[in-house]
Image: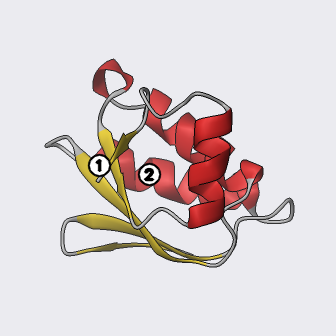
Amino acid sequence: MIQYIDQQLVVSKTINFENAEQMYQTGLKHIQQHKNFPLVVDLAQLEHGNTLSLAVLVQWLRQTPENKGLHFKNVPEKMLKIIQSCHLQDDLKLI
């Protein structure tokens, strides 16, 4: 589930093969409506920080000005390890 709360995009539950496209499209709508970047994406309620979840986040990032319009906070430990192993830590702004 994706909600826009307190000027943040809050991602909760899980992103899996059954809902990845829907999660991407829902998040993209919020991003396209946002005027002032960066937009913070809060992942504290994300249940599984897997490669599919990371792929959705990277696709969102590509839809922002200069591919730098999202800041990610509360990134799950497993996702942090994936980010590091893929050498994406310089491309993703983690707060």
Q: Residue at 53% of width from left, 59% of height from top? A: 26
Q: Is residue 45 above or below residue 40?
A: below
Give percent across and percent down for residue 82.
67, 46
Q: Tell me, yes or no, if residue 60 can be seen here.
A: yes
Give the structural element (helix, strand or loop) at label 1: helix
Give percent across and percent down for residue 58.
55, 37
Q: Are marks 1 and 2 in contact (CB under 8 Å)?
A: yes
Residue 92, by quadrant, is: top left
Decide if residue 26 is on the left or right side of residue 22.
left
How far apart are the alpha carbons under marks 1 and 2? Answer: 6 Å
Give percent across and percent down for residue 69.
29, 36
Give percent across and percent down for residue 27.
49, 56
Q: Residue at 44% of width from left, 27% of height from top? A: 91
Q: Which residue is at the front of the view, 48 or 87?
A: 87
Decide if residue 66 is on the left or right side of residue 51.
left
Residue furthest left as drawn: 36
User: Identity of the amino acid at label 2?
Assistant: Lys
Q: Quadrant of the C terminus?
A: bottom left
Structure colour scheme: secondary structure
Q: Pointer 2: what residue?
A: 29
Decide if residue 11 is on the left or right side of residue 51.
left
User: Identity of the amino acid at label 1?
Assistant: Gln
Residue 1, by quadrant, is: bottom right
Residue furthest top as drawn: 66
Which label was assigned to residue 33? Answer: 1
Q: Tell me, yes or no, if residue 24 can be seen here.
A: no
